[in-house]
Image (spheres, rainbow, N blue to C red):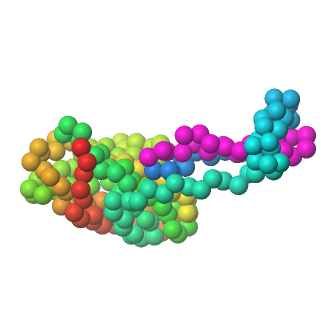
């Protein structure tokens, strides 16, 4: 979903635009800038003024919060599973990751990220994304800015038809903040999935 606002600044207009993921309400992209005032823009602002009772507002709309299936905090990052869906034999996780410390880089090792179902079957992650970056050569990495959530995903294939839930997901990662970097891993347990 694309949302935005206009604010009159005399001879120019401030435009704020956000692209939101409607499933997670995460901001995918945001931009703002000033452009010259035109008759068409004056018309839009006047329409906005009449709809808001004479006031132009630029305050953001409240963010829709989706309750995560599970949430884990590790090494200053908050990992939330927002959705876990099985389609055929492919299992997809939608994640939201927030860095609570200073800006840095997060890397997910796809080939070392493993999943166990309730029958003890083991699966290796086949594909992962962090923002717009896709996995390649066994991992995916992206800049994670402090306090700015980023969407991620994990894909596992050839899931057994016997599986009714997931007993454990082990996520293996690496972080880089300034001169400090380290590998870490953590677990989600007892994850239900939808079909």
Is 5 in the magenta?
A: yes
86 in relation to 187, above or below = above
Question: How far from the left and from the top, in percent, is residue 167?
Answer: 18, 61
40 to the left or right of 74: right
Question: How far from the left and from the top, in percent, is residue 85?
Answer: 28, 46
Image-quadrant location for residue 43: top right
135 to the left or right of 16: left
Q: Is residue 85 in sight in this rendering?
A: yes
Quadrant occupied by the C terminus:
top left
Is 3 in the magenta?
A: yes
Q: Is residue 114 in sight in this rendering?
A: no
Of residues 193 and 28, the one drawn nearer to the viewer in this rendering:
193
137 to the left or right of 61: left
Question: How far from the left and from the top, in percent, is residue 181?
Answer: 44, 66
Q: Which residues are magenta?
A: 1-23
Magenta-colored segment: predominant secondary structure: strand
Count the numbered circles shown: 0
Q: Residue at x 45, y 43 (%)?
A: 133
Quadrant occupied by the N terminus:
top right
Of residues 101 and 8, the one drawn nearer to the viewer in this rendering:
8
Q: Residue at x 49, y 63 (%)?
A: 99
Residue that protrudes farthest toward the right in the picture: 11
Question: How far from the left and from the top, in percent, is residue 29?
Answer: 58, 45
145 in relation to 157, above or below = below
Image-quadrant location for residue 3: top right
Residue that protrudes farthest toward the top in the picture: 40
Q: Residue at x 30, y 50 (%)?
A: 84
Q: Residue at x 21, y 50 (%)?
A: 124
């Amino acid at each position: 979903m694309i949302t935005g606002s206009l604010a009159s600044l005399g001879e120019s207009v401030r435009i704020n635009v956000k692209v939101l993921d409607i499933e997670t309400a995460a901001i995918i992209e945001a931009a703002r800038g000033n452009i010259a005032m035109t008759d068409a823009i004056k018309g839009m602002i006047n329409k906005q003024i009449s709809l808001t009772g004479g006031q132009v507002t630029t305050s953001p709309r409240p963010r829709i919060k989706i309750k995560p299936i599970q949430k884990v905090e590790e090494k200053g990052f908050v990992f939330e599973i927002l959705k876990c869906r099985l389609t055929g034999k492919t299992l997809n996780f939608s994640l939201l990751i927030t860095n609570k410390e200073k800006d840095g880089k997060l890397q997910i090792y796809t080939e070392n990220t493993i999943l166990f179902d309730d029958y003890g079957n083991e699966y290796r992650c086949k594909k992962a994304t962090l923002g717009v970056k896709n996995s390649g050569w066994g991992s995916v990495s992206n800049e994670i800015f402090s306090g700015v959530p980023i969407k991620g995903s994990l894909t596992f294939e050839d899931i057994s038809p016997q599986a009714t839930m997931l007993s454990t997901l082990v996520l293996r990662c690496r972080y880089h903040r300034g001169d400090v970097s380290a590998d870490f891993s953590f677990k989600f347990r007892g994850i239900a999935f939808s079909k």
